[in-house]
């Protein structure tokens, strides 16, 4: 466990794999009638509660101040509530694997925002990687989901809000990270803040309907377990790897989503979708190489 906790690469693989499990679990839940708001609440409330119990059992506490509260609710909205609602809304139209491909665009979007907000200066290779990733995104968008079952274009465009929100969250968490705060504490606070926001949203739209969760208790338990573990590692990866490296969990998550979608959910994707995913991967490789080269030159 210590090796994983101290290794950016190991954290990337573990966190991305656990994130990828959200996709098939979410598709199963929405297929039986669980509303996107409700399943997003399950993710945040489940993860926040389990991690809070773990924190208290270790004898630690959450200390609150204005900076942390702003951080909790900022992260809750940008990183969890918005992308999860979008993801669980589009997944039944696009498929788990195709929705997972949206995650692969997060590194490219993160680098764009980092450059625009002057968190990171652009390099020629980084800009080229962004361009290649964008071309791959256009190819993927053109295929519109599963083979033989093209989704309406507006669902594809809505799906692109996922990597945009994730990228904004990656940058925000870096520039707003409260001094002296630990990763588990931040995960607990931001997830419980997200759960509160989602409850308010459900009350405003007709009230939460928890009874439907009783039809899939094992899926709920598996989702809570996977989310709790994922977010414990997620904030550690943020601290160890930084925002652009962290954003590459989308690459691992997409692979898990594609494989699980095909093996367990009967999904299939055309050659053009795979080609687009390959082009996006090339863009990610270029932006990653640019980041590594920049880090090496600054040492």
Image (cartoon, rainbow, N blue to C red):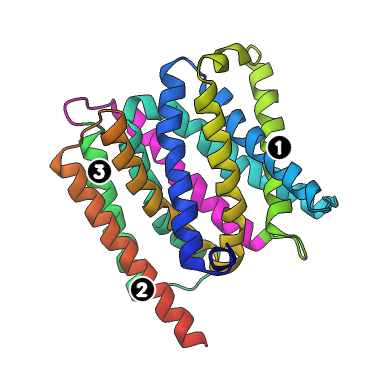
The residue depicted at 57 percent of the width and 54 percent of the height is: 234
Number of the front mark, 3 or 1: 1
Identify the residue position indicated by label 1 in the image: 49
Q: Which residues are magenta?
A: 147-175
Residues at badges 1 and 2 in contact (C-beta under 8 Å)? no
Q: Quadrant of residue 235?
A: bottom right
Identify which residue, 105 or 231, lies in the foreground: 231
Characterize the local packing of mark 3: few (<14), some (14-19) or many (20 or more) Cα atoms within 10 angstroms: many
**206 above or below 19?**
above
Identify the residue position indicated by label 3 in the image: 140
Characterize the local packing of mark 2: few (<14), some (14-19) or many (20 or more) Cα atoms within 10 angstroms: some
Q: Is residue 23 left or right of residue 54?
A: left
The image quadrant where one finds the N terminus is bottom right
The spot of residue 40 in percent (x, y) is 56, 31
Magenta stretch, main secondary structure, is helix
Number of numbered callouts drawn: 3
The spot of residue 85 in percent (x, y) is 52, 31
Identify the residue position indicated by label 2 in the image: 289
**Do we see residue 115 in this rendering?**
no
Q: Is residue 115 left or right of residue 179?
A: left
Look at the image and say whether residue 133 sits in the magenta stretch: no
The spot of residue 5 in percent (x, y) is 58, 64
Residues at badges 3 and 1 in contact (C-beta under 8 Å)? no
| Separation (CA) of disc 3 from disc 1 | 37 Å
The residue depicted at 51 percent of the width and 14 percent of the height is: 215
Characterize the local packing of mark 1: few (<14), some (14-19) or many (20 or more) Cα atoms within 10 angstroms: some
């Amino acid at each position: 466990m210590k090796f994983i906790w101290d290794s950016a690469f190991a954290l990337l693989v573990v966190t991305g794999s656990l994130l990828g499990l959200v996709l098939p679990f979410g598709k199963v839940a929405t297929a039986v009638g669980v509303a996107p708001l409700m399943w997003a609440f399950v993710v945040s409330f489940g993860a926040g509660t389990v991690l809070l119990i773990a924190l208290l059992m270790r004898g630690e506490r959450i200390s609150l101040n204005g900076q942390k509260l702003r951080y909790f609710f900022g992260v809750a909205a940008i990183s969890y509530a918005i992308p999860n609602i979008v993801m669980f809304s589009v997944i039944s139209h696009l498929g788990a694997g195709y929705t997972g491909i949206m995650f692969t665009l997060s590194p490219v979007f993160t680098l764009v925002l980092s450059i625009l907000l002057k968190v990171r200066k652009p390099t020629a290779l980084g800009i080229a990687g962004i361009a290649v990733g964008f071309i791959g995104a256009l190819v993927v968008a053109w295929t519109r989901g599963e083979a033989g079952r093209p989704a309406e274009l507006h669902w594809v465009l809505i799906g692109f809000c996922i990597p945009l929100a994730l990228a904004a969250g990656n940058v925000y968490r870096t520039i707003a990270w409260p001094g002296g705060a630990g990763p588990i504490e931040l995960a607990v606070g931001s997830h419980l803040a997200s759960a509160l926001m989602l409850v308010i949203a459900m009350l405003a739209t007709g009230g939460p309907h928890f009874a439907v969760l009783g039809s899939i208790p094992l899926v709920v338990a598996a989702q809570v377990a996977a989310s709790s573990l994922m977010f414990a590692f997620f904030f550690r990866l943020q601290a160890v790897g930084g925002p652009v490296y962290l954003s590459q969990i989308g690459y691992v998550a997409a692979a898990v989503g594609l494989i699980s979608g095909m093996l367990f959910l009967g999904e299939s994707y055309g050659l053009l979708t795979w080609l687009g995913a390959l082009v996006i991967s090339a863009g990610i490789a270029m932006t990653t190489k640019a980041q590594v080269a920049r880090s090496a030159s600054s040492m």
